[in-house]
Amino acid sequence: MDYLPLHEFRKCVARYHGNYKVRGFSCLDQLLCLAFAQLTYRESLRDIEACLRAMPSRLYHMGIRGNISRSTLAYADETRNWRIYADFAQVLIGIARPLYAKEDFGVQLEQPAYAFDSTTIDLCLALFPWARFRKTKGAVKLHALLNLRGSIPEFIHITEGIVHDVNILDLLIIQAGAFYVIDRGYLDFERLYAIHQSGAFFVTRAKRNMAAQRRYSRSVDKSTGLRSDQTVFLTSFYPAKHYPEPLRRISYRDPETGQYLVFLTNNFVLPALTIAHLYKTRWEIEIFFKWIKQHLRIKAFFGTSENAVKTQVWVAVCVYVLVAILKKRLNTPATLYTILQILSVRQFEREPLQDLLSPHFADFPKNDTAPEQLLLFV
């Protein structure tokens, strides 16, 4: 927690009056308790209360000043504005971004590259009636824009499950010169043209029934998996109306899986094989969603209100980015998974993190070097 910029957090709290008329349990106490729950895989508020009360002498050194109780935690999750933790997550993302600016992601590209997608978190409609998804099913969607250099989420938005993914493209602040890799579920030519007019580039997949007229073909090396590299114009009425500019259509057969893919992009400069490899990096966002679902608490929630759910998700994002910052600041070769597992069992021990995460911390002397060792058999 020493790596948290507490001054910035207090600014986020003051922005939404989070500590207004609060005496015993501040927003910082709530953040630390929920972060403890994320790091140690707590199951419920009662679980958090029991674990923290078991170490009363250590809470002060952990930064927790308020009294821990299940009802206090529940009330804080219901009433404290979730935007406090959303804004603080953006502060941590701003710290992590330059640390991973030169990270390699498998494609030789100077411009920033992002992958955009969403994942669905199933909920019980009886307990979460506000999370509409199906007639008898509830869910929320987690929409994320992932920076491919370091797998740091640049943008996160939480909606009801019924909201269509393509609508969230309207909320993105497009960065000129950047590449946005999206699935064909986001194939909306009016929104893609808005990305094009912003000076950015997109890479997506074409649908099978897309009507287009070929205007120009470039030669390709078919030994690499490429099949064609064409300049096309849309011919259907509404797509042509919404996207009047030419598009680049690249056909590619993956040598590993044999799958035939057709990509669409508005970039005519990069080699066709680079475009194909760039779309392949979109799998990083699927790995990100799978990672946070497996190793953080975002599938089972401590509260049933919309504010409680969003608070828990944003605190989970804060923990993820904080561990990523910790990895770079300590310059440790350990993976985020390894760091998280080590921290989960060493929460109440006063030991420097540099020693805790050292690659040599598990090197113990062998038995034959111990002079006092006795022989079992003679």
Image (cartoon, helix red, strand yellow):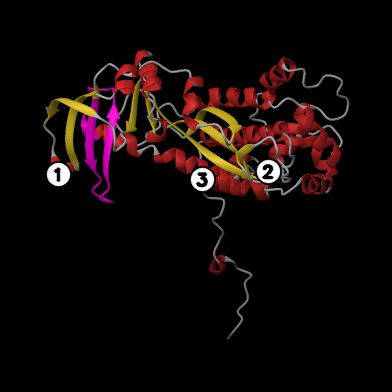
Label ID, residue 290:
3
Residue 19 shows up from this direction: yes
- The residue lying furthest to the bottom in this view is 378
Query: Which numbered disc, 2 or 3, marks the residue closer to the eye?
Result: 2
Amino acid of disc 3: Lys
- The residue lying furthest to the left in this view is 219
Which residue is denoted by mark 1 in the rendering? 223
For label 3, the SS is helix
Quote the CA–CA distance across marks 1 and 2.
52 Å
Query: Seen in the image, is 63 located left or right of residue 289?
Result: right
Identify the residue at horizontal 13%, vertical 28% (top origin).
217
Residue 290 x, y percent position in the rendering: 51, 45
Along the line of sight, which residue is nearer the eye, 232 or 356?
A: 232
Along the line of sight, which residue is nearer the eye, 138 or 104?
A: 138
Mark 3 or mark 1, earlier in chain: 1
Give the quarter of the image for residue 131.
top right
- Above or below residue 103? Residue 354 is below
Amino acid of disc 1: Ser
170 within the magenta span = no
Identify the residue at horizontal 21%, vertical 29% (top origin).
271
- Above or below residue 328? Residue 138 is below
Which residue is denoted by mark 2 in the rendering? 125
Residue 202 x, y percent position in the rendering: 35, 25
Residue range in magenta is 248-273
For label 1, the SS is helix
- Above or below residue 135? Residue 203 is above
Give the number of callouts. Answer: 3
Query: Seen in the image, is 104 located left or right of residue 378?
Result: left
Query: Which numbered disc, 1 or 2, marks the residue closer to the eye?
Result: 2
Quote the CA–CA distance across marks 3 and 1.
33 Å
